Amino acid sequence: MGLAERVEFILVTKHPENPEQGIFQSHQHCLQQGLATGARRILIFEDDVVFRDHAFHRRLEEACRALNEEQGWEALFLGCISQGSHKTRTKSLRKIRYRCLAHAYALNRPLAGRLAREPWSGIPFDELLRRYRPQGYALFPMCAFQGEASSDNHTVSVDRLRRLLGGLAFIQRANELYQNHRLLLLLVPAALLLAILLGLGR
């Protein structure tokens, strides 16, 4: 992806008792490494990230230029599941409400610092990030997806459900489609139902 010279791959020892705590601390460790360099923005990838779009560079460059002019942005997601999505003045950038999946994201320094100082309290990292309600944006369309390898999280039943639904990549794409075209997707079935009811009434 052209990132080999710019990304530091950090190896950690798995947590001996709690995989979720280990994942939490790994994210914090990466953020702390970035903060120590004086970075104003820190881009984090989980080790199983997969890029399904190999021509996203121009869109990402356009999105970053737009964010440089945006006041108060805190997070940029190259892939995630959101609870809402809204257009911006830039075609390749959407304003979102982050829901989950922290496999490819950038944080500005203030938010990275706050997250890096959070003590472990039994809350998974992506849930903690959601609770912070960051001023979040996403590349449009998203280019990064979480791999299908089994998770270290204690979520075996959730993992099975995800696989039954087509896997994380499919779920993420479906979520993005729904959030970006929600009104249309809701209006079409309603219009069809109305047409059926009118047809039955004749």
Image (spheres, rainbow, N blue to C red):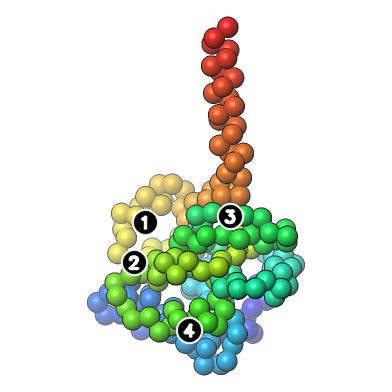
Does residue 122 show up? Answer: yes
Secondary structure under tag 3 reads strand
At x 62%, y 55%, the residue is 86
* Pointers 4 and 1 in contact (C-beta within 8 Å): no
Per the image, the residue denoted by label 2 is: 153
The amino acid sitting under disc 4 is: Gly
Per the image, the residue denoted by label 4 is: 113
**Residue 193 position (above or below residue 24):** above
Marked residue nearer the N-terminal end (4 or 1)? 4
The amino acid sitting under disc 2 is: Asn
Q: CA distance from mark 2 to mark 1?
A: 9 Å
Q: Tell me the tag on residue 93.
A: none
Per the image, the residue denoted by label 1 is: 159
Residue toward you, 38 or 55 = 38
Q: CA distance from mark 2 to mark 3?
A: 27 Å
- Give the mark toward the camera: 4 or 1: 4
The answer to which quarter of the image holds residue 93 is bottom right
* Pointers 4 and 3 in contact (C-beta within 8 Å): no
At x 52%, y 88%, the residue is 35
The amino acid sitting under disc 1 is: Asp
Residue closest to the far left = 17
Does residue 52 show up? Answer: no
Label 2, residues with CA under 10 Å away: few <14, some 14-19, many ≥20: some
Answer with left or right where residue 168 lies relative to residue 138. left
Per the image, the residue denoted by label 3 is: 85
Marked residue nearer the N-terminal end (2 or 1)? 2
* Pointers 2 and 1 in contact (C-beta within 8 Å): yes
